[in-house]
């Protein structure tokens, strides 16, 4: 039998605290509703539509984050330039700002009289109390996951591999599509899932910008405030089950995904 | 022909300063230098991966300084092969042809041909991670050569391989050089590779070229202490040179007087390669101008050869085969005679 020294045993005991601290409440929550209540909640159109709004808006936010985040990640991975540290800091700022503050900051700009909201409202795009508002609130708080993860993926590709592709006749954009992007795809997908999950869980910024249409976290909050914890719990169970299911599915898929990080 | 004119580039800690060089068609040219001497970045400048800060590069008398990599058509093989890990051996080799939009059947045919040539046909559907170092290197070579580049650049192509594979590949390189009618520019820090492969070498030091010439020329007649040191000249002796008898130069080291065919006067360094010195236990008649009596100071057993340090007033290193070492019954302190020709003494 393997023997562990005292330090390892001690550290393992200390470390298991955090694991249990996260694990127990989740398991407790998931087993706290009986199936009849869950089923009746699943038949409640308000619950279903709020979950739909959450999932759908988060997906949209993730797509936008990918569209703009991947090119940024590639630049950050491949180039050194003046002000790079500043850009990196900006990308990470949403992690440290309180989310209600994010909501206020976005509201000031995207309200129908704000500097971005005003011109966009003229073409019929409103943000306050509308899906676009939910999407931008989610985008703000979650896009850094895509950028950072994709960047890590690109940094793991030896630049010389791209150089070889170029000597063989591939232009820089072509090289990106046939070499860099496929090799970084795993990191990009991981980042996207994190981004999407973070977007679904956003509450603070969303309620300030768009209380309605209700997203699932807002509905849970509303039910809790109006009818108490018993009413909020089933919705919470449904939401967490959905998130965990997707999380586990992606993990399983990832395990089968060949990694090329280290040649 | 590749002509490099006043080429300079600074990138991070690497520097290329004012390099001038001509590489002839179908030449096997080796840049030799310690790590950090700027060899790789010089290759990448030739390939067009970087643009120089100043200076020009000509290929076949055309200025290609501003031509992008993908339009230069130069083959490039890196130390760690840089095979595309998500593509099979076949797909890796076919890459250059795919970029040129060549017809599928033709690609199939050409890739099969070149895989046969390198003896890697059986690996066609394998991914690079499942290949040995030698197999990866052959795949990388095939991938670079299939576009029929006029010039092949190789950056430390043998450094990551074990000795046997390295020997095999050296033969392969010689073969490729003949068969493909190609100019090869090869970068290494390993002098043996240069000895076995190069038509000419350039010794690089801190981003500039210290000496260019035939391998033999650089080997026998290093131009300065750095080159001498780098090519493994063990005997470097300081002395004062003046005109001697028979139109030879005589170098007084303070302890002994050495004769050389090189023409120099004043303070000089004399170098003598260890393998140019012969040794005997009794004085024998010889045509060599330099004969000294001394004793053995140190013996290093290097396996098949034995390295000796002898003291003849100056310490000199020489090498013997194991057999002659045993035949001569040498040991430390034993009195010996050494001989070397005036032509073996290089001065700088």
Image (cartoon, coloured by chain):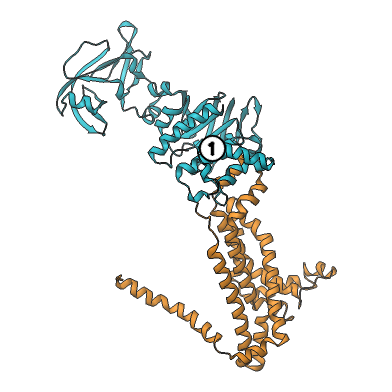
Chain colours: A orange, B cyan
B47 vs A238: above or below: above
The picture quadrant where one finds residue B347 is: top left
Q: In the rendered image, which quarter contains the N terminus of chain B?
A: top right
The image shows residue B235 at horizontal and vertical percentages of 30, 25
For this rendering, which residue is in front, B274 or B225? B274
Residue located at (66% from left, 69% from top): A140
Q: Is residue B166 visible?
A: yes
Label 1 element class? helix
- Picture quadrant of residue B341: top left
Q: Which residue is mark 1?
A: B116
Q: Quadrant of the C terminus of chain B?
A: top left
Looking at the image, which is closer to me, B208 or B198? Answer: B198
Task: Look at the picture and state if A228 lies above or below B144.
Answer: below
Give the crowd class for mark 1: few <14, some 14-19, many >=20 residues within 10 Å. Answer: few
Task: Name the quadrant containing residue B18.
Answer: top right
Q: Tell me if B339 is positioned left or right of A165 in this view.
A: left
Q: Where in the figure is residue B56, as x and y percent of width and height?
A: 62, 30
Image x and y of residue B35, in percent: 44, 39
Q: Chain of mark 1?
A: B
In the displayed structure, would residue B32 be above or below residue B84?
above
């Amino acid at each position: 039998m393997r023997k562990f020294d005292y330090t390892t045993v001690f550290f393992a005991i200390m470390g298991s605290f955090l694991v249990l601290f996260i694990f127990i409440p989740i398991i407790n929550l998931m087993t706290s509703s009986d199936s009849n209540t869950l089923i009746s909640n699943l038949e409640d159109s308000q619950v279903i539509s709020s979950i739909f709004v959450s999932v759908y808006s988060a997906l949209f936010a993730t797509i936008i984050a990918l569209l703009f985040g991947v090119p940024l990640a590639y630049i950050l991975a491949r180039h050194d330039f003046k002000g790079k540290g500043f850009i990196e800091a900006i990308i990470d700022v949403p992690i440290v700002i309180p989310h209600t503050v994010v909501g206020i900051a976005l509201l000031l700009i995207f309200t129908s009289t704000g500097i971005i909201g005003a011109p966009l409202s003229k073409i019929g795009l409103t943000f306050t109390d509308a899906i676009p508002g939910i999407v931008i609130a989610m985008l703000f708080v979650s896009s850094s996951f895509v950028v950072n993860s994709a960047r890590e993926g690109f940094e793991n590709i030896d630049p010389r591999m791209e150089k070889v592709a170029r000597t063989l006749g591939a232009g820089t954009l072509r090289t990106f599509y046939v070499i860099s992007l496929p090799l970084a795809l795993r990191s990009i997908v991981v980042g996207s899932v994190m981004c999407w999950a973070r977007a679904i869980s956003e509450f603070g910024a969303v309620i300030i910008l768009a209380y309605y249409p209700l997203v699932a976290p807002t509905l849970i909050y509303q039910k809790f405030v109006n009818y108490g914890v018993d009413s909020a719990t089933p919705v919470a169970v449904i939401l967490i089950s959905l998130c965990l299911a997707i999380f586990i599915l992606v993990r399983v898929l990832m395990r089968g995904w060949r990694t090329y990080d280290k040649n | 022909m590749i002509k490099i004119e006043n080429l300079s580039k600074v990138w991070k800690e690497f520097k290329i300063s004012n390099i001038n060089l001509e590489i002839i068609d179908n030449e096997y040219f080796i840049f030799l230098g310690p790590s950090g001497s700027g060899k790789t970045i010089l290759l990448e400048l030739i390939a067009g991966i970087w643009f120089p800060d100043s200076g020009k590069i000509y290929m076949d008398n055309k200025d290609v300084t501003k031509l992008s990599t993908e339009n230069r058509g130069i083959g490039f093989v890196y130390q760690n092969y840089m095979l595309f890990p998500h593509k099979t051996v076949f797909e890796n080799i076919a890459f250059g042809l795919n970029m040129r939009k060549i017809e599928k059947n033709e690609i199939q045919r050409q890739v099969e041909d070149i895989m046969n040539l390198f003896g890697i046909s059986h690996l066609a559907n394998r991914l690079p991670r499942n290949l040995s170092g030698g197999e990866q290197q052959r795949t990388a070579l095939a991938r670079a050569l299939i576009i029929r580049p006029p010039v092949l650049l190789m950056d430390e192509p043998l450094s990551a391989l074990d000795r046997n594979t390295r020997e095999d590949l050296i033969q392969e390189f010689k073969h490729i050089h003949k068969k493909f009618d190609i100019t090869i520019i090869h970068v290494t820090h390993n002098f043996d590779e240069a000895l076995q492969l190069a038509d000419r070498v350039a010794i690089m030091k801190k981003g500039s070229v210290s000496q260019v010439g035939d391998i033999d020329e650089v080997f026998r007649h290093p131009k300065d202490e750095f080159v001498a040191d780098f090519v493994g000249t063990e005997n470097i002796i300081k002395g004062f040179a003046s005109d001697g008898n028979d139109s030879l130069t005589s170098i007084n080291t303070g302890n002994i007087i050495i004769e050389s065919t090189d023409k120099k006067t004043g303070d000089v360094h004399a170098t003598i390669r260890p393998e140019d010195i012969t040794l005997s236990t009794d004085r024998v008649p010889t045509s060599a101008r330099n004969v000294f009596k001394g004793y053995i100071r140190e013996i290093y057993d290097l396996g098949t050869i034995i390295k000796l340090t002898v003291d003849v007033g100056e310490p000199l290193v020489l090498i013997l085969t194991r057999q002659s070492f045993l035949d001569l019954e040498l040991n430390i302190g034993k009195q010996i005679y050494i001989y070397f020709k005036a032509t073996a003494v290089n001065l700088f």
